[in-house]
Amino acid sequence: MKAEYDDLVYRCPYLPDFSTSAEIEPAQGFIGQERAKKAVETALKINEKGFNVFVVGLPGTGRRSFVTSFLQKYSLKMPAPKDWVYVYNFSNPSEPRAISLESGKGSQLKSDMEKLSEEVIELVEKTFESEDYASKRSELEDEYMRKKTVLWQELQEKAKELGFAVQITSTGVVTVPIYGGKPLTPETLDSLPDNVKEMFNENSRKLKHIIDGTLYKSRKLDREYKEKLKDLDKYAALFTIGALFDEIKKQYESNYDVVEYLSTVENDVLANLSDLRSENEDLRQLYKKRYSVNLIVDNSELQGAPVIFERNPTYSNLAGKVEYYSKGGIMLTDFTLIKAGAFHRANGGFLILEVENLLKNPYAWECVKRALLSEEITIENLENALGFSNVVSLRPQPIPLNVKVFLIASPKVYYLMHAYDEDVRKLFRVKSEFDWELEMNEDNVKKYLGFISSTCCEFKLPHLNREAVEKILWYSSKLAADRGKLSVKLGEISSLIREACSIAEERENKTITRQDVVCAIEQREERVSLIQEKYDSQIKARDLMIETSGNKIGQVNGLTVMELSDHSFGVPVKITARAHLGKSGVVDIQREADLSGKIHSKAVLTIEGFFGERYAGHVPLSISATINFEQVYGMIEGDSASLAEVIALISAIAKIPVKQEIAVTGSMNQHGEVQPVGGVTEKVEGFHRACKLHGMTGSQGVVIPKSNLKNLVLSDGVLSDIKQGRFHIWTVEHVDDAIELLTGKKAGKLTKTGGYERGSVNYLVIKALQKAREISENRVKTLKRRKTRKSK
């Protein structure tokens, strides 16, 4: 049946009355994703482990924008999560301590500790320079000097009683024997009587014990002095800085971890007073760093829960890292160089990741799974996690994790991960699936118009007039490949409107017109149509041998679609068939050359089934046939050429010419029924371009399945030629309809006698098969006779 122009013109019956899109109320939120929205809402209601969300949809359907926008609104109802800081661990410096504080308190603690460390060092310095401290220290020194003086006086008196004098030198205690009131030299001592020498030796041993005891008491006094001096220093410092620590502890008295930390800082200050009052500035700065706070998560300016989209989900960008600096050729680090990752920033809220980017980064996916399974964030550099580094590093205390992760992926990636990684099923129990099209009805058209209006408002663009809006809807239906649907690739629609606005501004139009939109579409197609133009130039030069006029036996114009990442277009292809005596069956040259996909191979077997059902009941098939896609050197996939292949085979068997000015697309089952195919608009426009290049005859056109009529969203150029009768589209439901169109003969129905109508195509096919059968049988008889003669 021939499709009329009115059947092919794009119309939207649900457009309300308006002059420009300014009269339409802008849409709030996203349109056409109720299924996805319900799934997200379900996941948000369940705060259990494993109910993270896999957002699945085609690129351009607004997956990330929708999720981000929805979560940002939802998060405003949630409380702001806690701040997190890392501080110095005085008991184990290699394991910095993590402390949580109420939102906004983290930055306050950081500021308070910076001030505290400055004030503490300043007060310590002033304390030990004060007259009061000097006086008390002097008193303590005098007291211990008196005690040591008494101790040494007692030693000298005891030595004198034993006949010795005691001298204290830098090398120790020296004893000198006294006899007759004079010190003795070693020579003089030897000259004395034996009883006198024996006395001196005995007294020397006694004096040695007394000296050892005195030295022990002296060292004990020194230790007591140092302890008392330390106590004095601590008392003096505590008296000065104690009020500071009491004041700051009071500010954070509700947070036990902070109060405990401040107590350890206070104890460390008192234990290192000598270093703190040192004139070595580097040493003092070292202590200031020790008492500082590393604020890794600051939610002070956050309203509600955080919504974090990590564009570059590397391992360190997700889990954080420990940085290093070089000093004297040595790599050094400390707790102030701990850096937060996306999990830290999203903790208490939501983290959005694109799976394609996640899988590109080594160990990033494992990092996500580890964090969700353990419910904590462990900061460990990648080289350490993989065991590739021997550098000693910090081991920061893990932070509890409470986050809901949203992974954005295409359907292909999702199904692969779901099939091969069982952790996906454990951790991402909710699937939010994005549709790529909308049913065209009054409600959806209203929402779509609202989106167009909101786009103009959002980007401060001039509004579109009614004709421009209709053309936008036409483009949307073309993206959806159905006149009864609208595409949900809203990013494409938004960018088209902005391009049309740029053209309108160049033309100084106050509103965007239909011509501006048409021009924007043409420019967009021109940018991506280089390959298409190369094919067209080959068709024009007849390097691609496509016939668009005349009649040929065993040759039909099929239609294929070239699918590129950013553009798809139709290309006609010559399908040829040849029949000859031989083993019955259809030989697919593409399949024999390993250039046929599984679906196309199935289609060829379906064709064999059709021929067997239609003709083998009348006469055994004694003919062999070959099918080829001429000048096609890549893989052939799909069954959309099976209708054209059947016509080419019938033409080759019955020697019936086929019109070359008509191209054919359509799938076919074993009963001869024509089934819908994809890319029908591109195929029609592809053959139309070929006819234009070779010259229009007025009788050219395309045969398509009737069920594909709704999928045609044709360009103005094709519609114009159809309106003028220069190009035609026919719809068919059965192979016989296509046979009659392309051969100009009746297909032929079965008569009461069991045969086909005389002169019909099916009749001629049966006749050709009978003739082939007779020839085959005669050959067999001739061979038998020859064998019989030879045997005689």
Image: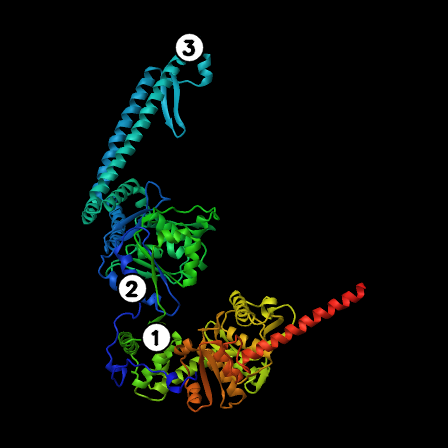
- Select label 3 or label 1 by which is in front: 1
Residue 589 location, x and y as percent?
60, 70
Identify residue type, mark 2. Answer: Lys
Q: Which residue corresponds to the image point at 30% horizontal and 85% vertical from the top-left?
A: 466
* Label 2 packing within 10 angstroms: few (<14), some (14-19), many (20+): some
Closest to the observer, 568 or 295 = 568
Look at discs 1 and 2 and give the one toward the viewer: 1
Q: The disc labelled 3 sits on which kind of residue?
A: Glu
Quarter where residue 19 is shown:
bottom left
Q: Going by the picture, which residue comes out furthest to the front? A: 753
- Across and down, in percent, residue 663 comes to 51, 81
Label 1 sits on a secondary structure element that is strand
Q: Amino acid at mark 1?
A: Leu
The x and y percentages for residue 389 are 47, 48
Numbered label attached to residue 486: 1
Q: Quadrant of the N terminus?
A: bottom left
> Which mark, residue 582?
none
Report crowding for label 3: few under 14, some 14 to 19, many 20 or more residues within 10 A (C-alpha).
few
Classify 149 as above or below 33: above
Is label 3 in contact with label 1 (beta carbons under 8 Å)? Answer: no
In this rendering, position of residue 637 left or right of residue 80? right
Residue 444 or residue 740, whichever sits in front: 740
Above-or-below relation of 509 to 554: below
User: 188 and 448: which one is in front?
Assistant: 448
Question: What is the distance, in whole Å, between disc 1 and disc 2 at their CAs?
Answer: 19 Å
Q: Is residue 65 left or right of residue 564?
A: left
Structural distance between the alpha carbons of marks 3 and 2? 110 Å
Task: State the residue position of label 2.
Answer: 37
Mark 1 surroundings: few (<14), some (14-19) or many (≥20) residues within 10 A? many
User: Of the residues under marks 1 and 2, which one precedes in the sequence?
Assistant: 2
Mark 3 sits on what residue? 198
